[in-house]
Each structure stands twice: as C-alpha cells, then as structure tokens.
Image (cartoon, rainbow, N blue to C red):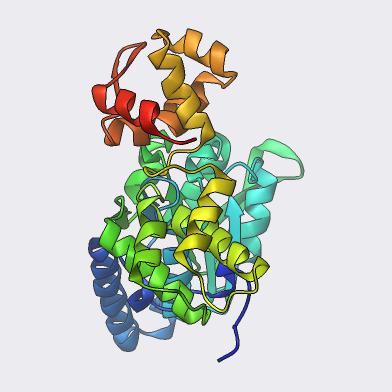
C-alpha cells in the first residue's frame, strides 16, 4: 500500500473514538454530546440549545487542539474558526470573529489565557447573552446590541486560572487533560504510523519513540515519529528501523529520557554549583519564565530536580543521568 503522505499532520482526527489516552475527557464529551443531540431532537426551532461552551485545560502538547477538531466533527458543524489568544488582541478582532459565526460554526481559541481583559469581557457577554454590544456613533457612552448566532465556543488553556473568574465559570463543560503513559503514547504512535501506511521494524521502534516524548503526543508524533520517518526515507528504507530511530535521536540530540540540549545544559549548570534561578538564567541565556514554565516541569516530574523558592538543586538521579548520557 502506498504512503498516504509524508507528514504526520496529514491525518486529521474526525472522531472522539480516535482519541487515546484521555478517557475522562472523551467520556465527558461523549455524554455531553448525547445530551445535546437528545435536547435538539425535542426542541422547537426558536429554542435550539447550544453546545458548551467548552474549556479544555492541561499541559501543552497533550491533545487539546486534536480534541477540539474531533468535537467539531462530532457536532457536524460546517465552519471552524481557529485562533490563538495572543492573536485576538483587540475588541474589534474578537467582534469580527463573533459576527462571522453562524449556528453551524465552531470557534476554537487556543491559549485563551492570553486574551486581554477587555476582549474577555466581550466574549463573556457573547456567551451569556448571545449579544455583541457596539458603540453607537463612535461614542463609548452609548451602545447598541447585535444578536449573535448559536455558535459553539471551545477555549483551550495551559493556565486556566489566568482567565477571568466570570468567564471561566461560564464554561459548562470543563475538561482536564493529563500527561500520557508510555503505553498510551505507544498506541498513539502506532495509530498514526498505521494511518499513514508507514511501516516499522517492530513494536520496540514505536515504544522507543514514545519513551522519549516527555509524556506528550505532540513530541511523540511531530518530533520523534516524523524525524524517524525522515531518516528512514533518506536511506531509502522500506520501513523505519531501530537504527533509523537511534540516528534520528542523535541528530536531534535527544537522550534516553527525552531531554534536549537546553535541558541538559540546565542540569549541568546546577551540577557545577549554580542554584539561584536568576544566576541559572544568566548562565544559560534563557529567560526566567522559559526556565520555570518550559524547562523545569518535566525535570521535576522525573525527579531530576528539586527546588525551594528561587533555589534549584540537582538530584542524585539528575547527576547520574548527566554523568552517563552520551550527549
């Protein structure tokens, strides 16, 4: 069978049944969908219910965007408007999105915590009253309302408590995503490789790709599986071999735990005696926020790092890993 494509993202998720590793999220959404469709069946045209709004929360890379796409397909909505919280920076931009939405539209806003307060206020009114209030004649003191369609709103956030309480509490369906087990990630990699008709030497290939993905599908697929495929095709192999996988990780400089160059540099800085966050940031050339929000979470989960306030300490496990890694 010929390859369907050469990119892991050429496969689109069209059903919640395709989502693996988040059973609580999937079950919650399936029950909500069943209730919604039953309500629609008995509702009068002028009183059609809306689905949601939905809030998807959890770490980056754990599948929130994929679930939003699957949900859009399950609802059989015709239009999908996707944007990012940082991109919707003005009331005018949010108003344009809301006014373009129809009853068959899903609006998906990723990283919703980045939406500023004024725009969040507009969004709050839109979902609570299904109206958009616009200034009359350019005056801020006088306004008129525009009715909005019965669209579906899905917000995704890595830091949901940075959303306004009023907006967060208006979200009727609240789904929390967790990190993935190696078994679930292996199944996800297998599902995607099989969908693309990418052959692989054995199950160990899939498990190795999963084990170095920091418990997230995004890294397992977009980085690990894609690079292994690229290496395999560069050698004209008919399947992804374990040798291809090892070469891919050497090119990426990803070690056995899934750590990259920056994370190992961070641990080596601790190993050399630096413990204060501002000093570490200076020596690594990384912003403090990047260290706290991007570098440290996985190191803490893997017990490679301890921290107390602004003080960081490498653990014995962290020391042994750095001393024995080949990169």
Q: In which quarter of the view is residue 116 placed? A: top right
Return the x and y of residue 207 as percentages of the image width and height.
34, 62
**Residue 128, picture quadrant:** bottom left
Is 10 located above or below residue 270 in the figure? below
Along the line of sight, the residue nearer the viewer: 230 or 142: 230
Which residue: 57% across, 42% down?
119
Residue 232 vs 290, above or below: the answer is below
Question: Depth check: 120 or 132 in front?
Answer: 120
In front of the other: 306 or 71: 306
Is residue 7 visible to us here? yes
Q: Position of residue 232 (x, y in %)?
A: 58, 68
Q: Is residue 210 above or below residue 260?
A: below
Residue at image position (61%, 69%) is 7
Quadrant location, the N terminus: bottom right
Using residue 103 as the reference point, say whether residue 202 is left or right of it. left
* Residue at the farthest bottom position: 1
Rendered location of residue 72, percent (x, y): 47, 73
Image side of residue 240 versus residue 169, left or right: right
User: In this rendering, would 316 be left or right of 256?
Assistant: left
Furthest-right residue in view? 137
Q: Is residue 147 visible?
A: no
- The structure residue drawn at horizontal position 69% and vertical position 47%, both measured from the top left corner, is 92
Q: Position of residue 196 (x, y in %)?
A: 53, 79
Which is nearer the eye, 297 or 39? 297
In the figure, is residue 43 to the left or right of 134?
left
């Amino acid at each position: 069978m010929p390859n369907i494509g050469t990119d892991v993202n050429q496969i689109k998720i069209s059903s919640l049944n395709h989502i693996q590793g988040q059973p609580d999220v999937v079950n919650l959404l399936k029950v909500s969908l069943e209730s919604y469709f039953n309500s629609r069946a008995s509702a009068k045209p002028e009183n059609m219910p809306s689905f949601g709004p939905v809030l998807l929360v959890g770490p980056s890379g754990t599948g929130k965007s994929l679930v939003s796409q699957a949900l859009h397909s399950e609802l059989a909505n015709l239009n999908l408007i996707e944007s990012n919280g940082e991109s919707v920076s003005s009331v005018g931009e949010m108003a344009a999105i809301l006014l373009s939405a129809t009853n068959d539209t899903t609006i998906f806003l990723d990283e919703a915590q980045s939406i500023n307060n004024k725009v969040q206020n507009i969004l709050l009114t839109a979902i609570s009253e299904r109206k958009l209030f616009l200034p009359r004649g350019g005056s801020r003191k006088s306004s008129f309302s525009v009715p909005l369609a019965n669209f579906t709103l899905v917000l995704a956030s890595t830091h949901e408590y940075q959303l306004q309480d009023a907006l967060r509490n208006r979200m009727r369906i609240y789904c929390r995503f967790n990190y993935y087990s190696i078994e679930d990630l292996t199944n996800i990699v297998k599902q995607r490789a099989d969908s693309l008709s990418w052959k692989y030497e054995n199950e160990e290939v899939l498990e190795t790709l999963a084990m170095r993905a920091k418990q997230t599908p995004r890294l397992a697929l977009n980085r690990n599986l894609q690079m292994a495929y690229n290496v395999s095709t560069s050698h004209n192999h008919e399947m992804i071999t374990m040798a291809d996988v090892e070469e891919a990780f050497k090119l990426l400089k990803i070690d056995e735990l899934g750590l990259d160059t920056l994370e190992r540099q961070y641990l080596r800085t601790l190993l050399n005696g630096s413990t204060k966050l501002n000093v570490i940031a200076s020596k690594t050339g990384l912003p403090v926020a990047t260290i706290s929000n991007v570098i440290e979470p996985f190191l803490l989960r893997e017990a490679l790092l301890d921290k107390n306030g602004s003080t960081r300490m490498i653990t014995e496990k962290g020391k042994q890993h750095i001393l024995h890694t080949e990169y």
